[in-house]
Image: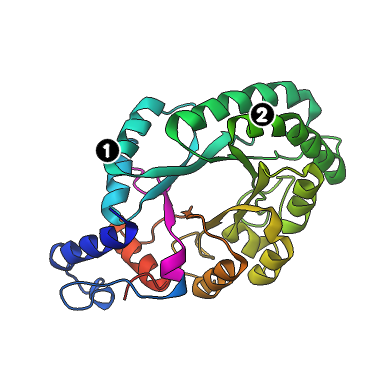
Amino acid sequence: MTNKSTRRSFLQLGAAAYASTALTPFISGASATRVPSATAKSLDLALNIEMWLYNMPFVERIGKAKELGFDFVEFWPWRNKKLGAIAEACKKYDVKVTQFTGWGFVPGMNNPDNHAKFVTEIEASCKAAKQIGAPMMTVVAGNDQPGMTQAEMHEHVITGLNLVKDIAAQYEVMLIIEPMNIRRDHQGHCLYGSVDAVRICREVNSPWVKINWDLYHMQISEGDLCGHLNDGFDQVGYIQLADHPGRNEPGTGEINYSRVFTELIKLGYDKPVGVECSPSLSATESSQNMFRNLGMIE
């Protein structure tokens, strides 16, 4: 079932099952239909099932994500997950994993003392990605290292990525490095904003090493979302979103995501967009709010 039909069926049921004052503005009559806009036609959403549905057993979240209207999911570390069960659930519900975290904050990739472990873990993570059909995985640069300048840490990140880019190519799994923000969420992280991330990826110069371009982090770090996307789009591997302030779904904060999505489509982005945010209301209500605010339903 496509995202289009899933959302329509979900909303038809939702009109009866979830009728309330909060939902009334998002339902047109007995059912809602997809808006034939460029955004609705061109982009899908991948629900982060670590931040949504966290009160359910992990594997059950995949089926619930489908029920909410998502054909794609993403998550964080794979080490504490049952990969076989994830693969089975994805097949059962016709859901795909877009990406997960293959290398986290600690130990830092930005310290050469950790590069041997980094290489070993990336190969293991690539095997995990193939098991669940994920085409990408996030790698984190790391927190500030004592006695190192930011420039030195970034050079170590480049060295580390150069060590593993052929492994990524061998397994055909894209590594997406994620710049964070240090104002609100990740103070002390060595990589923030798009400029340094773009430079790092251009230095590595591999189609298998790109950026996890989280628009929430970028808004806090630098703003001018569309301008920076234009400057660095050749290094975009994946897009994530959350509104700001609050890190909730689009429509709850200051970011005009309809405008940003229009720019993404203009630039040629055609992958799912990761919904790495917390629902401000129930999962059901926030899903409908988000689809409507992005122009995906009326």
* 28 up-or-down from 57: above or below: below
* Label whose residue precedes the other's in the sequence (1 or 2): 1
* 78 up-or-down from 273: above or below: above
In the image, taking residue 44 as reference, residue 32 lies left or right, namely left
Q: Residues within 10 Å of mark 2 (few under 14, many from 20)?
A: some
Q: What are the residue bounds of the magenta stretch?
A: 39-57
Residue 277 in the image, given as x and y percentages of width and height: 47, 55
Report which residue position mark 2 lands on: 167
At x 65%, y 34%, the residue is 169
Question: Could you say whether the residue bearing mark 2 is in a helix, strand or loop?
Answer: helix
* Label 1, label 2: how far apart the Cα atoms are: 30 Å
Question: Could you say whether the residue bearing mark 1 is in a helix, strand or loop?
Answer: helix
In the image, taking residue 247 as reference, residue 142 lies left or right, namely right
Reply yes or no: does residue 49 show up in magenta: yes
Q: In front here: 116 or 174?
A: 174
At x 22%, y 78%, the residue is 28
Report which residue position mark 1 lands on: 92
- Give the residue type at disc 1: Lys
At x 61%, y 35%, the residue is 104
Q: Please identify the quarter of the rendering in which residue 148 is found.
A: top right
Residue 128 in the image, given as x and y percentages of width and height: 50, 28
Residue 276 in the image, given as x and y percentages of width and height: 48, 52
Reply yes or no: does residue 203 show up in magenta: no
For the residues bearing labels 1 and 2, Cβ distance under 8 angstroms: no
Q: Please identify the quarter of the rendering in which residue 161 is found.
A: top right
* 11 up-or-down from 62: above or below: below
Residue 124 in the image, given as x and y percentages of width and height: 57, 23
- Give the residue type at disc 2: Ile
Instruction: For residue 183, say whether it is visible.
Output: yes
Q: Please identify the quarter of the rendering in which residue 6 is found.
A: bottom left
Total residue callouts: 2
